[in-house]
Structure formats: C-alpha cells, structure tokens
Amino acid sequence: MRSVGIFDALEAAERGNRAIRPGAPREQRAAIAVDMAGRLINMNASATRIVGRKLDQIKGLPIRDAIAAPDLRELVVEALLCAEPVSRQVVLADGRQVRVLAWAEELCDGDELVVGAVVVLTPSVTI
C-alpha cells in the first residue's frame, strides 16, 4: 500500500478549497486520506485523537470499519460523497460532542492521477 504524505495532502486540500477559512490551528485540523476503494491509507495526529485509534490499527481498513464512532463515520463518508463542505454536531470516540466542519478534496499522485481523497475535519473546539 502506497504511503501518502498527510501534511502534503492537508495542504493540498486547503489550497483546493480557498472558501474555507478553518478557525482551528493547523495542528488541530484532522486529515484522513483514503484510496479509491475507500480504505484508510493515512491520517495525521489530530485525526488519530478524533478517531480514537492508532493508524497502524486501522490502516487499510474500509473507512466504514476504521472509524468506530457512528456520527463521525457518517460525517466523513458524507464529506467524501459531497461536493460541498458539511458541518454537523458529532459524538467523538471519547464521547465528547463537538461541531465539526468536514470537506474532501481529490488526492493526486506525482503524475496528477487521482489516487484517492483527503478529508479535512475542523472541530469547533480544541481537541
């Protein structure tokens, strides 16, 4: 399985959606990268905290199996399917309720071929 540079993916997603001005500092924005089959291929430390599981435990799993918290899982799947950002109150893996803004951007390889997507999650509270 190919490793995706999550910070490169996060920067690409933020560049791709200039209309979004996340209020949370970069280190609190979660980024989850999935391949074309919907399997989790990488995530940053904030995503690990939000999801409540370590990358090595869930890497390669379908996103529906990788994220245990139903509200968060549904938000990530919706962001992958929608062309617009989505925002909703969700219950995180640790039981906290927070409002989260989510959007997805295509993830391309060095040849500009689409290899998946990156979902950026911006919680309205500090994680």
Image (cartoon, rainbow, N blue to C red):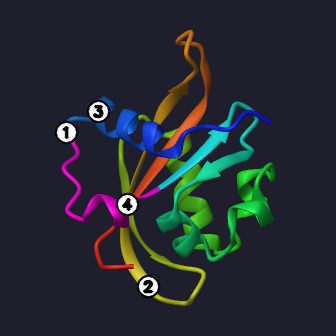
Q: Which mark is residue 97?
A: 2
Lower sequence index among marks 2 and 3: 3
Residue 81 percent coordinates (x, y)? 55, 40
Give the residue number, with chain letter if any, for mark 3.
Answer: 15
Helix or strand or loop: what does disc 3 sit on?
Answer: helix
Report if residue 21 lies within the magenta region: yes
Q: Left of 27 or right of it: where is 117? A: right
Dividing the image into 4 quarters, which one contains the N terminus? top right
| Residue that appears at 47% across and 88% down | 96
| C-alpha gap between disc 2 and disc 3 | 28 Å
Residue 19's disc is 1
**What SS does tag 1 mark?**
loop
- Of 5 and 51, nearer the camera is 5
Q: Is residue 67 left or right of residue 78?
A: right
**Label 3 sits on what residue type?**
Arg
The first of marks 2 and 1 along the sequence is 1
Q: Which mark is residue 80?
A: none
Q: Earlier in the sequence, mark 4 or mark 3?
A: 3
Type of amino acid under label 4: Arg
Q: Amino acid at mark 1?
A: Ala
Q: Is residue 15 magenta?
A: no
Tell me the quarter of the picture where residue 116 sits: top right
Dot label at residue 29 = 4
Residue 76 coordinates in the image, percent (x, y): 55, 55
Q: Residue at x 30, y 58 (%)?
A: 26
Q: Marks 1/4: CA distance? A: 16 Å
